[in-house]
Image (cartoon, helix red, strand yellow):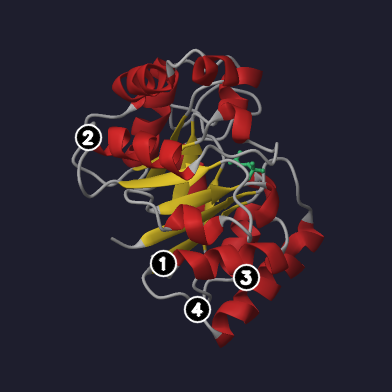
Amino acid sequence: MRALIAGNWKMHGLAASRCEVAALADKMKASAPADCDVLICPPATLVAAFAKDFSGAAIQFGGQDCHAVPSGAHTGDISAEMFADAGAAFVIVGHSERRADHGESDAEVRLKAEAVLRAGLTPIICVGESEAERKAGTALDVVGAQLERSLPETSADFVIAYEPVWAIGTGLTPTLADIAEMHGFIRSNTRKDVRILYGGSVKPGNATEILAIDNVNGALVGGASLKADDFYPIVMAGGKQ
Ligand code: PGA
């Protein structure tokens, strides 16, 4: 299976951040990972410009969230069709920051995932337990319920990202055994050809060991995706699966 190394820039990045994409493209021109897709999800304002400027590079671009309907009276929202029109290939849905900041439910996440597929793009559907749920020993149950309620019923391509909420932006990661257990569990609940990414404090220093775990088919990277110098080694680790 081809790995997917995806960068989630969150609410970081201005037009000048183009230089980081250019630096990554240059590094990848010199040496690119084999069997690995590389994706950057910048703020929505930058997707169209990046997709146009880097159309010749082996980097794809995506959105971080979308509305479930194609168009309408929804001030400030962006549809999956608009991301497709801007040149995006993927859209992240159900990130824990969207679930927490905007109260998004699993049902809403599923509608958004279906919208991404409707637009001809690939959804990256995020799931993950909180620290309290991990400590209470209910992580598998929580993630199992999220999968049951937020995955679209489709034979089309989609991606699952397992991101323990307590590992995001904290520098903490689960043990390799805990990642292996969760990814094995997710695999047993989904198709064999669905890529399952790990996300949460992936850095150049831990990417190789995390990406070597069974059923870890790539990474969703936040902070370490903002600088080409940090993201490139993670991209290269993705090619070594
Ligand atoms: P982080 O974020 O790599 O900064 O922990 C991951 C994410 O939220 O996708």
Numbered tag placed on residue 32 in the rendering? 4
- Counting from the top left corner in percent of width and height, residue 228 is at 69, 67
Mark 1–mark 3 Cα distance, whole angstroms, equals 21 Å
Within 10 Å of disc 4 (Cα), the crowding (few <14, some 14-19, many 20+) is some
Q: Amino acid at mark 3?
A: Asp
Q: Secondary structure at mark 3?
A: helix
Query: Going from the N terminus, do you reach mark 4 or mark 2 first?
Result: 4
**Total marks drawn?**
4
Residue at the farthest bottom position: 30
Marks 4 and 1 close (CB-CB < 8 Å): yes
Query: Going from the N terminus, do you reach mark 3 or mark 2 first?
Result: 3
Select label 1 or label 3 by which is in front. 1
Q: Amino acid at mark 2?
A: Ser
Classify the position of ligand 1 by quadrant: top left, top right, bottom left or bottom right.
top right
**Which residue corresponds to the image point at 47% horizontal and 15% vertical from the top-left?**
105
Circle 2 sits on which residue?
A: 188
**Which residue corresponds to the image point at 69% horizontal and 63% vertical from the top-left?**
230
Would residue 24 be visible to someone looking at this image?
yes
Mark 4–mark 2 Cα distance, whole angstroms, equals 32 Å
- Counting from the top left corner in percent of width and height, residue 75 is at 64, 24
Circle 1 sits on which residue?
A: 36
Q: Secondary structure at mark 2?
A: helix
Query: Going from the N terminus, do you reach mark 4 or mark 3 first?
Result: 4
